[in-house]
Image (cartoon, grey):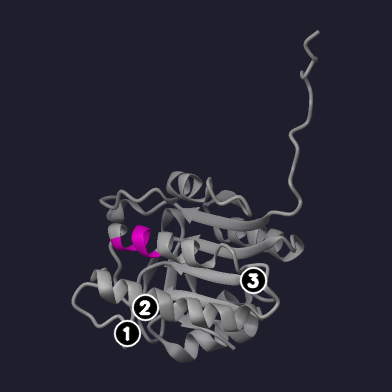
Amino acid sequence: MARNTRGRKRTVDKRKLRVLLLETQLPARLAASTRRQIPFMQELLRPFKGLELISERVHSRTDLRKFLDLARRDTRIRVVHIVSHGEYSPKRPVIVLTGDEKINLGDSDGRRLFHDLRGKVILFSCCEVGDNDELMYSLLKTSNAKAIFAYTDTVTDAQALIIEALFYHLVRRDLGKRDLARTLERIHEQLKFTLHFLGIDGNRDALTTPLLTAYLP
């Protein structure tokens, strides 16, 4: 006799570590970008048995605050991956949310949104916001994160998808390690070498001035 599976709850594997993907909708003036990170990440992480993707759309500062609170509460979330447009200027380095709302990372209120993400890795998939070492280390201190990865210049959709696919391929087995900071430093060196060899960073030297930079304690 066939078992009645109707109403059966989906089994959740509590051993899996999680990636929290927060994607914004680009403002109309940037609508030429075709990147849609959520379906890409769903396919990318599907074969990785130890990782689970949680994806959310971010439409406002309130949404961003809510989902970062989720990351603080959920100890299985190890990567907070933010996909947004970024714009850098010395006084106003911003990430752009849906509807052109901006979060100014140069302002203490903007950085405070990321406070106490202890033990997480923050990945900013945003143009230019990693172009200020002092700012990124200030954000690292506020967040208590294990590391921050951020782009230092304009990044194309193709570059971002390739770089981030390589990032997850390298990091997927190590997110549960205690000495994660040292592991991430090694992984960043591997990533720089691979991007340099493949020429993904365009005309820059990925070994000395990488497009994706890691900030570690």
Question: What secondary structure is found at the residue carrying circle 2?
Answer: helix
Identify residue type, mark 2: Lys
Marks 1 and 2: in contact by CB < 8 Å?
yes
Identify residue type, mark 3: Lys
Residue at image mark 1: 207
Task: Say whether residue 159 is left or right of residue 68.
Answer: left
Q: CA distance from mark 3 to mark 1?
A: 25 Å
Comes first in the chain, label 3 or label 1: 3
Question: What secondary structure is found at the residue carrying circle 1?
Answer: loop
Image label count: 3
Comes first in the chain, label 2 or label 1: 2
Q: Is residue 106 visible?
A: no
Question: What secondary structure is found at the residue carrying circle 3?
Answer: loop
Residue drawn at x 53%, y 62% as measured from the top left: 81
Residue at image mark 2: 192
Q: Residues within 10 Å of mark 3 (few under 14, many from 20)?
A: many
Residues rendered magenta in the picture: 159-163
Task: Say whether residue 19 is left or right of residue 69.
Answer: left
Residue at image mark 3: 120
Q: Position of residue 144 (x, y in %)?
A: 66, 81
